[in-house]
Image: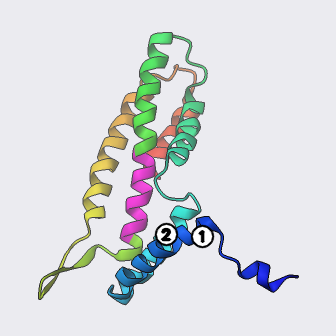
Amino acid sequence: MDLEKDREVKPEEDQVLPELLELLEIFRDLPEARKKNLKTRLKKEAAGEILTEAEVEKERKKIMELFKDVEDDRKKKMIERKVKEMAFQAVAIREAKYSIMTEGLKTEVVNGSQRYMKENPAVATFDKYSRAYNSNIDKLIEYLPQQQTEKISKLAAFRNA
C-alpha cells in the first residue's frame, strides 16, 4: 500500500474542494436542527430516495400494471396520461409526508431579528397533491373493465394508503 499515492489529489477532487469549502461556510451558520434535516435529506437524495425521474417512473410502472388488460388504444392513452400525473403526485406526497414527519407541522422562520413559527409548506403540498391524487384514482377506476373487481380493490388501497 503506497501512502503517497493515496494522498495525491486527483484533478476532479481539486475542483470539488472550493465548492465543499463554500458549503462548509454556509453549513456552519445554520441552526443545529436545520443541519440535521439537511444531512438526512442529502443522504436520501444521494441514495436516490427523493423526488427523481427514476422514482416517478417506478411508481408509474406500478400503477400501469393495474391497467395492462385495457385494450382500447384511446382509453389506454388517456390512462397513461393520468397515470403519469398520479405517479408524480404519489412521489411528491411521500416527499411532503417525509418533510412533515422530520420537520413537523410548523417550522421556524427567521426574518432578520424576528423568529416565528409558520406552517410547514409541505403541509399545503401534501393536502393539494393528496386531493388531486384521490380525484385521479376515482377517474381511473372508471376505465377498469367490469370483471377486474380485485384490481379495483388494489387501486382503492393505493388511494387510502
Residue 66 picture location, percent across and down = 57, 31
Main secondary structure along the magenta-highlighted residues: helix
Q: Residue at x 60, y 70 (%)?
A: 13
Task: Please tell me the numbered disc located at residue 13.
Answer: 1
Which image quadrant for residue 147?
top right
> Is the residue 118 above or below the residue 95 in the image?
below
Q: Nearer the viewer, residue 31 or 79?
A: 31
Residue 95, magenta (yes or no)? yes
> Is the residue 139 above or below the residue 6 in the image?
above
Q: CA distance from mark 2 to mark 1?
A: 19 Å
Which image quadrant for residue 124?
bottom left
Give the residue type at disc 2: Leu
> Badge 1: how crowded within 10 Å, few (<14), some, or many (20+)?
few
Judged left or right of residue 43, residue 7 is: right
Q: Residue at x 66, y 69 (%)?
A: 10
Q: Residue at x 60, y 64 (%)?
A: 12
